[in-house]
Amino acid sequence: MESAWTPDPPSTVDIDRNGDVMLVLGPSESPRASLLVSSKVLSIASRVFEVMFGPYFMEGQAMREEKNPAKPLQLPLPDDDPSGVTILCNYLHHRHLSLPKSPSLDLVVEVARVADKYDCAAILRPVVAAWMRPYLFEASAEPQLRDLLALACLFDDAWSFKTVTAQILLANGKNFGYLRNGKLSHAIPESAFAALECERDSARQYFANRLNSPILSLLERTESIRMLSGHNQDYRVPRADHHQTKFCLKDALTVAGYYRELNRLGLGTFKWSIPIKDQLASLAQFNSAAVNLDSELDARSNSCLPTNRCPACVIDFSHEVNGIISAVLSRCTGLCIDCTLKIPATPNNCRMHHTEPLLFQVRANDVLSFAHWTEEDIQRLHR
């Protein structure tokens, strides 16, 4: 006759050898671990435990009635992750040598979830910030970015918030709904979603406009449109801003070649659904094609004299493209957590230095001040 199966007794960790509370982790029918801890330490760190061990709750009343140091209070925590609770208790009891040096991001999220549940997240801010650092520049998957953003919000980490929002602005091409699906997503305020949308749309529009910047000087007169339409004669038009330079056939061919190269890279029409990072990577490939483009134009047009070179002769596409990439990246440096969480914002008082408010804040301030506009202000807006 086979004996009935019985679960193995849970492993016991004496976090405080003189502790008066035994935390029983895992389901009641098969607990996974037991932690001997100090109720005093937990009460100092957590308002939740302070109330729980007080005179008005069953746990606190049981402790006062028992008063037997050899028999600590059994406190079941069936819904909490054993690893997260163990790390939290080790940290609160100053057992720093027992903490993991490089925990996985999932484990950091579990620790944060437990700390948030028991209202002691602020105490863990330094160690969680250190654990997050290795992931901030390596994360590219949406779940990682979501968890890092939630951690930065929960622990009020201004530097991490700015860094991870920069990654999100560059890596996300669609909506930000995935940020709402994590274990800690409740820590992300609604203002963060609005700020991300505003800043990404602004960066996209800036990128689309900057793609035209290398040849704007070549399109100052409507006659250039005629050349792009098939006029191959040596047609010269004086330029309004540079009287010593002429708009010639080579200028027109340069315009056509530039847009032909953008089309080859998939950037002829700016695609709003593709992440900015991917489009910048495509634009970076333009550098190797620029020399070939110049050689082709030299062979097709010899209308410029060495003493009177046109803009197409001196334009450096490698420099121009690198300038576009740098300029767009400078618009995606991340958000300020202080400006994101408060309206109106005061950039001079923010922890992360910046001179101008977020576009999200500018629009929010405009909405807030609309109620104080006069009739003259409204008429000025419509002029």
Image (cartoon, rainbow, N blue to C red):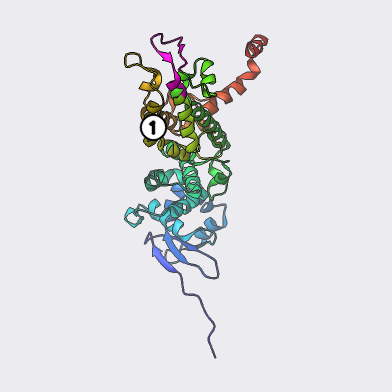
Which residue is located at x 63 percent, y 14 percent?
381
Left or right of 236 on screen, residue 182: right
Q: Where on the picture, by quarter, is residue 324?
A: top left
Residue to which mark 1 is pinned: 290
Which residue is farthest front? 233
Percent position (x, y) of residue 207? 49, 30
Percent position (x, y) of residue 304? 37, 18
Q: Is residue 170 visible?
A: no
Which residue is farthest bottom? 1
Rendered position, 232 above or below 122: above
Q: Where on the picture, by quarter, is residue 215?
A: top left
Left or right of 366 on screen, residue 9: left
- Marker count (numbered): 1
Which residue is located at x 44 percent, y 28 percent?
350
Q: Residues within 10 Å of mark 1 (few under 14, many from 20)?
A: some
Q: Look at the image and say whether residue 240 sits in the magenta stretch.
A: yes
Assign a secondary structure to mark 1: helix
Quadrant that contains the N terminus? bottom right
Percent position (x, y) of residue 331? 45, 30
Q: Look at the image and say whether residue 290 sits in the magenta stretch.
A: no
Which region shows up in magenta?
234-252
Quadrant that contains the C terminus? top right
Q: Nearer the viewer, residue 63 or 308?
A: 308
Look at label 1 and name its amino acid.
Ala
Q: Is residue 62 visible?
A: yes
Q: Nearer the viewer, residue 376 or 302?
A: 302
Q: Nearer the viewer, residue 232 or 351?
A: 232
Which residue is located at x 55 percent, y 24 percent?
229
